[in-house]
Image (spheres, rainbow, N blue to C red):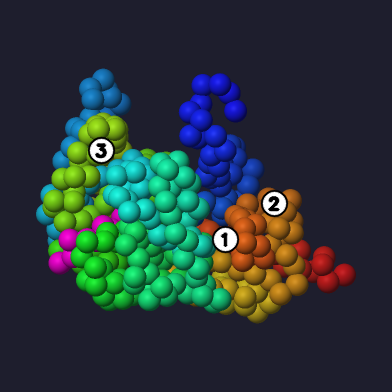
């Protein structure tokens, strides 16, 4: 630790993003990006826009907020756009956890990092043995509850009805639902923000709308909550989305047909590959996301990760408690998944020798 870092941050353990190798050496199935390009609407919206970069962007992200609100049948005052959901979630941890935060033991690893970064007390709630999240376990808590739904990296989802019941029980306790993967088969809680003032739903454009590199996301909530959220945002980073990203995200959300085509293709590929993996001796969770969370009966996760990488396929290995034996595989294009399956079969063949 150098002498200038705040002593409070001594020992801070940062989030480790998935590897981002430069130059197409690997089939990249490690960070849940979309295998499909952004919508053609996005290409069109960005044409000739470079010269506008001279000017600051709209700090209120108005056109984008309007497009998001329209897509979900909400009002723009229910929406705040963010520079990726990581930005919005970081601000939520900083500003909306007055009594601390509570989240699952196996979930998005960044929650713990933000809690520690901002010095927020947090409670870890253990998932059941089969990795299901039991909302009963959260009933008596006063902390802000943060739920990734579907959860990552387990891929399992809980129903909006159950989340609504939990929210209704304690109107003074905030519930944050991180829906980064909701578009791949789970049910969104977004319509509930019209009724429940203590619910905030965060979605991203990184996965189902093919804009991971653009950094766009939004949170939806009650108008008063969103007003406070804007006060926080304007105290930190008013111009949080650049001009190109605002245009790209607004265009992407307007192209419903493309969105539905891409998400259905991913779901179809996920189901096909899941079936094959089961016949190859893998145990899988019932993923409702664009990734597969899998453990092999004989070969440890760390070994699979290493051998796949040697064969030019990158997957994600966490190596953390309770999930040491699992790897997480992003659902790519059919061709990418066929190459992954071929590498996997070769590994299994070599191991059987
Ligand atoms: C559960 C979850 N939430 C949020 C994010 C952040 O996504 P982004 O910042 O790209 O919107 C991720 C990224 O992988 C994630 O897995």
Q: In which quarter of the view is residue 61 placed?
A: top left
Indicate the quadrant where residue 94 lies: top left
Return the residue nearer the eye: 64 or 76: 76
**For the residues bearing labels 2 and 1, Cβ distance under 8 angstroms:** no
Q: Quadrant of the N terminus?
A: top right
**Tag 1 residue:** 329
Q: Earlier in the sequence, mark 1 or mark 3?
A: 3
Q: Residue 168 location, x and y as percent?
A: 22, 71
- Stretch in magenta: 195-204
Which numbered disc, 2 or 1, marks the residue that appears first in the sequence?
2
Give the quadrant of the C terminus.
Answer: bottom right
- Image coordinates of residue 288 in percent, x first then y, are 43, 70
Left-right relation of 326 to 58: right
Q: Is residue 16 above or below residue 128?
A: above
Residue visible at 25% across and 45% down?
Answer: 81
How many angstroms separate mark 1 from mark 3 (CA)?
Answer: 34 Å
Q: Position of residue 125 (x, y in %)?
A: 46, 66
| Distance of label 3 from label 2 (alpha carbons) | 40 Å
Q: Residues within 10 Å of mark 3 (few under 14, many from 20)?
A: many
Which secondary structure lies at badge 1? strand
Of badges 1 and 3, nearer the viewer stands 3
Circle 2 — which element?
A: helix
- Dot 2 corresponds to which residue? 309
């Amino acid at each position: 630790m150098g002498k200038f870092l705040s002593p409070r941050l001594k020992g801070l353990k940062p989030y480790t993003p998935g590897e981002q190798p430069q130059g197409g050496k690997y089939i990249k199935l490690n960070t849940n990006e979309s295998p499909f390009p952004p919508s053609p609407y996005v290409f069109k919206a960005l044409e000739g826009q470079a010269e506008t970069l001279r000017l600051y962007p709209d700090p209120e992200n108005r056109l984008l907020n309007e497009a998001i609100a329209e897509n979900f049948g909400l009002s723009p005052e229910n929406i705040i756009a963010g520079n990726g959901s990581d930005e919005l979630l970081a601000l939520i941890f900083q500003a909306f956890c007055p009594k601390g935060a509570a989240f699952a033991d196996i979930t998005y690893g960044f929650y713990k990092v933000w809690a520690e970064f901002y010095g927020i007390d947090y409670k870890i709630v253990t998932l059941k043995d089969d990795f299901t999240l039991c909302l009963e376990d959260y009933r008596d808590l006063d902390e802000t509850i943060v739920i990734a739904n579907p959860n990552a990296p387990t891929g399992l989802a809980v129903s909006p009805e159950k989340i609504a019941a939990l929210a209704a029980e304690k109107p003074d306790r905030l519930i944050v639902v991180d829906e980064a993967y909701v578009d791949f088969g789970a049910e969104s809680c977004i319509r509930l923000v019209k009724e429940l003032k203590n619910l905030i739903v965060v979605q991203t454009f990184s996965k189902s709308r093919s804009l991971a590199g653009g950094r766009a996301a939004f949170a939806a909530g009650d108008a008063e909550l969103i007003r406070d959220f804007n006060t926080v945002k304007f105290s930190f980073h008013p111009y949080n989305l650049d001009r190109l990203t605002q245009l790209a995200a607004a265009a992407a959300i307007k192209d419903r047909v493309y969105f539905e085509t891409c998400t259905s293709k991913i779901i179809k590929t996920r189901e096909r590959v899941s079936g094959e993996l089961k016949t190859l001796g893998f145990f899988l969770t019932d993923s409702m996301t664009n990734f597969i969370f899998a453990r092999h009966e004989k070969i440890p996760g760390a070994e699979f990760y290493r051998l796949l990488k040697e064969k030019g396929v990158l997957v994600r290995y966490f190596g953390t408690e309770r999930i040491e034996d699992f790897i997480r595989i992003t659902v790519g294009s059919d061709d990418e998944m066929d190459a992954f399956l071929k590498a996997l079969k070769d590994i299994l063949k070599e191991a059987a020798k």
